[in-house]
Image (tube, coloured by chain):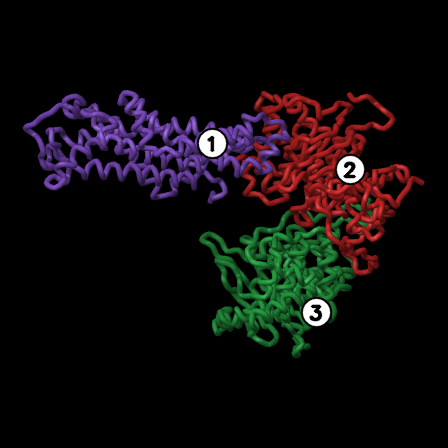
Amino acid sequence: MANETKRDILLDVQHLKKYFNVAGGQLHAVDDVSFTLERGKTLGIVGESGCGKSTTGRAILRLIEPTSGSVYFEGQDISKLSKEEMRKLRKEIQIIFQDPFSSLNPRQTVSQTIEEPLKIHGMKNKAERQARVRELMETVGLAERLANAYPHELDGGRRQRIGIARALAMNPKFIVCDEPVSALDVSIQAQILNLMKDIQRKHGITYIFITHDLSVVNHFSDDIAVMYLGRMVEKAPAEALFEEPLHPYTKALLSAIPVPNIHSKKERILLKGEVTSPINPPKACRFASRCEYATDKCRCEEPELIEVKPDHFVACHLLKKE
Amino acid sequence: MNAANTRKIPKKKSQAYEIWRRFKKNKTAMAALIVLSLIILSTLCADFIWDYQKDACSINIKNRLQHPSWEHPLGTDELGRDMLCRLVYGARASLTVGILGTSFALLVGGTLGAIGGYYGGKLDNLIMRCTDVLLAIPGLLLCIAIMSAFKSNVFYISLSLGISYISKFTRIVRSSILSVRDQEYVEAARAIGASDFSIITKHVLMNCMAPIFVQYALAIGSRILSVSTLSYIGMGIQAPTPDWGNMLSGARAFIRGNTYLVMGPGVALLLTISSFNLIGDGLRDAMDPRLKK
Amino acid sequence: MSNDMNKTNDVMLDIKNLVVEFKTEDETVQAINGIDLKINKGKTHGLVGETGAGKTTTALSILNLVPFPAEKPTAGTIELDGVHLYKTNEKGECVPALTEKDYQSIRGEKVAMIFQDPMTALNPIFTVGDQIAESVRLHQNVDQAKAMERAREMLELVGIPAKRADDYPHQFSGGMKQRVVIAMALACNPSLLIADEPTTALDVTIQAQVLEMMRGLRDKFGTSVLMITHDLGIIAEMCDEVSVMYAGRIVEYGNLEDIFDNTRHPYTQGLFNSLPNIEDRKAELKPIRGLMPNPADLPKGCAFCPRCDYAMEICKTVRPERKWLSETHCVECHLYDDGKDVSKL
């Protein structure tokens, strides 16, 4: 299949940008984001609302057309594909949505929803399709009797399982998971996370896992990228990031997680200052207005993402390559 | 249950059946459906009872202005024709024009609205401005203008009534599409590689059918009313072909002494139009699976 | 009722055997099935549970705002600072003890509530100052100027410059709006603050700021707080006591040590095991199997029985009684019948 390199890179995103035209200028939702992702691994993208993490996921899949930049999937630049070529490629790259309530067509039954991608990508035989639907429902743990139920008859956890089954239907190589468990209760959330891990183990799927929940992303990902107002500010293996966060924003973010443990004594970094507007942002570090270490350089020059330690990338003027 | 049985996904009743099952529970809508069916049935059976040329069109002065009797249940008009017979044949003209005209409007207006709503941008702008222009011309005036340019037959009347209703459908279809276009399941359909056509028909239109259906049923009622209006002022269906509008128009002069002459077509119009409205409402409720009980 | 010993005047809120049922044509939804809840003055009580456990309904019962078709509790009593809000009549039914007017004066003045979504809690066409001033004027006999002054004061308290009182809600960010909502809730010095998922809609860094601020104000005014949340992390940071709710029952109650270090109920245990451990990323998640029962068709015995790994025969048929394991810690579970102490699940 893919040309075997030393590190088997499945996805290579280069200088991805998405600007939206809004009243008052251009909203820099995703601003020059680059990263690579190895086959079979999970990259977690974390950040707060409005940091551009969902837009990044959708721009990679071209559900939103990126303003500029390239996305290489198995060495092929998919941002240059025609609409029809892209449509065919969609069986390889999939997405699981955040909201299991709005991501399912209310007029389609469970089996119709799961069957649709099979129909689109040319599985002509009806019996074959039905068999595949049954197989998928079993994989995601949906009882067969639910095949003809409508989404509104099911709870959030089951709906999310339908969404996962639909994404898995064509055996994709790569799935963008956009906050797949944020709308679910804790006990159901754990069920879905375990299911997604199992599926990854069995089918060798590569994930991008987008979330605002740091404890979930820590549990789920191999690498974690932290985004702030459209920029990637830090990217490192999960362990390294949690043990030794380098960017001041990452530090504040990690310290803010409420830990369900009454003995954990950790110092909380409370951020001050106003959030910079992502509309026509100034040429500066976007975190500078809230950063306690900000210098004059931070306020007039945008820091580049540099490899400070092996595999540990940070965009901050305070840090230099060791 | 043994394993072999459970392998088969239990077949549920089709969606149409489900809609019908829910529709049946709505008593007023069912009553309206029955009334409407009776009206349609009577027009279909009319030829077995009467002779169209002889009973509905030819003049028989001897019988003029007879009050209701066993022979003529609704009496006779000023030219001695049986009112019941003319009423039934009149329904044929009104219903045909109503349904044809509305369907034409839905087809053209709906397609334009769907395209504009789904793709947006300049195309949408162009379509909407054109409908604005159409909307600025009073509907009836437009019909009269078209009617004076063409022959007054059923086809042209339907066409003119349809044209004046296009912009309404464009707006309704467009706004319903806008409300579902940005739903995540539409994005999900794009993500699995569905084509634009299948996204519009299966995911977008299917979810905004309810308001469109309701509007369709209401529009038939309103088109029937319009054709009657046109006929009433002499621009619509031409005598001797019976139509509720020209029947009312003819009865106008005799309304004091022979009130029964306006009762027939008046009540028929009322029943037909309200039936369409009630059926529209009933369908809307029945088509929403979220209301399923 | 067990443990009625410290019935002195330092009880702020006392709910006894509260039952709320929503009756519709074809089913009865049992939202709350007999809960007892007591908050002492100046204490923060955490109510934790998942969607549909009955947390919000409990809060709305206190304010006499239970939505249609129930509109009022089916049974039970609620006492607020010694005043009965609901009492039980001769027939054993729960009846409101006050007039609607009295409830109105209690809402806002004695009990204030903060809702989850700050975006919809503010009226977009009035300035935030006006809105805070209005809630002051509703309950205190002061003129507009005094009320405005109070509004500015409150804004400063929640960390918003007083000059922003003339701004409209859309000029504030989500976290700032929630601060405004809190300012509005605290403007009349309520003795009880009900916070229903106050930070769920906020980002983590903003949540940290808001929680910090709430903690400060609570300590400053000695307000009692009923903190409703699904996040055990917030409970650990904010609360003195915790009630764990499941399917309309409080299945475990205790202070922080009881709940976090001596977890007894299998459901509470399950909640902890479902959470990814931030200190040990390799640890396997152990979710609670199955789903929340349908509140219109609860199991006959223990509501958690179908999902419980320790379920016994008796759990299927008999609803467990409340068992006090210590002065502060009680649990509703058959595992602890006959004084059996399964020290570690």
Residue matched to label 1: B129
Q: Are marks 3 and 1 on the same chain?
A: no
Nearer the observer, A311 or A280:
A280
Which residue appears at 40% of the width and 34% of the height?
A: B135
x%, y% of residue C32? 57, 60
The disc label shown at residue C43, or none = 3
Q: On what subunit does the disc labeled 1 rest?
A: B
| Chain shown in green | C
x%, y% of residue A278? 71, 43
Nearer the observer, B11 or B73:
B73
Question: Disc 3 vs disc 1: which is toward the camera?
Answer: 1
x%, y% of residue C107? 56, 68
| Chain shown in red | A
Q: On what subunit does the disc labeled 2 rest?
A: A
The disc label shown at residue A43, or none = 2
Amino acid identity at mark 2: Leu
Q: Colour of chain B?
A: purple
Marks 3/1: CA distance? 63 Å
